[in-house]
Image: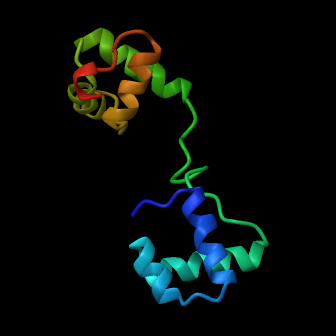
């Protein structure tokens, strides 16, 4: 089950009422360990843990040099991001992921999101 702020609040209230971790985990359909992690985070910080904010790996900032290389590669080959990834790697000897190349192409107005996949 995906936890949101309301469910985390409920878990903490149950732990404050001395409900067993196993019972909370069964009710919420999550692991006992996850209930323990939420409770420990609450005890350490004194406030409910937040879910979904600043999660995951931070994004790399926009690099002007990479943008120039992608622009030059696009002018030479007129490829999309996935084919351009290979061309940039071979010609410019630099590895830029196709997702990042697509980001640069979109910023330059040379590509757009495919609405069929969203």
Residue drawn at (63%, 82%) of the image:
15
Q: Nearer the viewer, residue 75 or 43?
A: 43
Residue drawn at (33%, 20%) of the image:
113
* Picture coordinates of residue 31, whole percent (x, y): 42, 79
Residue drawn at (44%, 72%) of the image:
28
Q: How is the image coloured?
A: rainbow
* Picture coordinates of residue 10, whole percent (x, y): 60, 68
Relative to residue 102, is residue 7 depicted above or below? Answer: below
Residue 101, located in which quarter of the rendered image?
top left
* Picture coordinates of residue 74, whole percent (x, y): 31, 14
Image quadrant occupied by the C terminus: top left
Residue drawn at (52%, 87%) of the image:
21
* Picture coordinates of residue 62, whole percent (x, y): 55, 29
Q: Is residue 60 left or right of residue 92?
A: right
Q: What is the count of numbered marks?
A: 0
Relative to residue 10, is residue 2 depicted above or below? Answer: above
Relative to residue 56, is residue 100 depicted above or below? Answer: above
């Amino acid at each position: 089950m995906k936890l949101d702020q309301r469910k985390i609040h409920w878990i903490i209230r149950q732990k404050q009422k001395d409900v067993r971790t196993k019972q909370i985990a069964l009710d919420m359909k999550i692991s006992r360990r996850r209930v323990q992690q939420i409770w420990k985070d609450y005890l350490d910080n004194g406030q409910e843990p937040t879910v979904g904010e600043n999660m995951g790996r931070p994004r790399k900032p926009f690099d002007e040099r990479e943008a120039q290389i992608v622009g030059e590669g696009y002018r030479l080959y007129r490829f999309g991001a996935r084919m351009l990834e290979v061309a940039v790697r071979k010609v410019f000897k630099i590895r830029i992921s196709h997702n990042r190349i697509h980001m640069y192409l979109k910023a330059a107005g040379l590509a757009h999101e495919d609405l069929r996949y969203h």
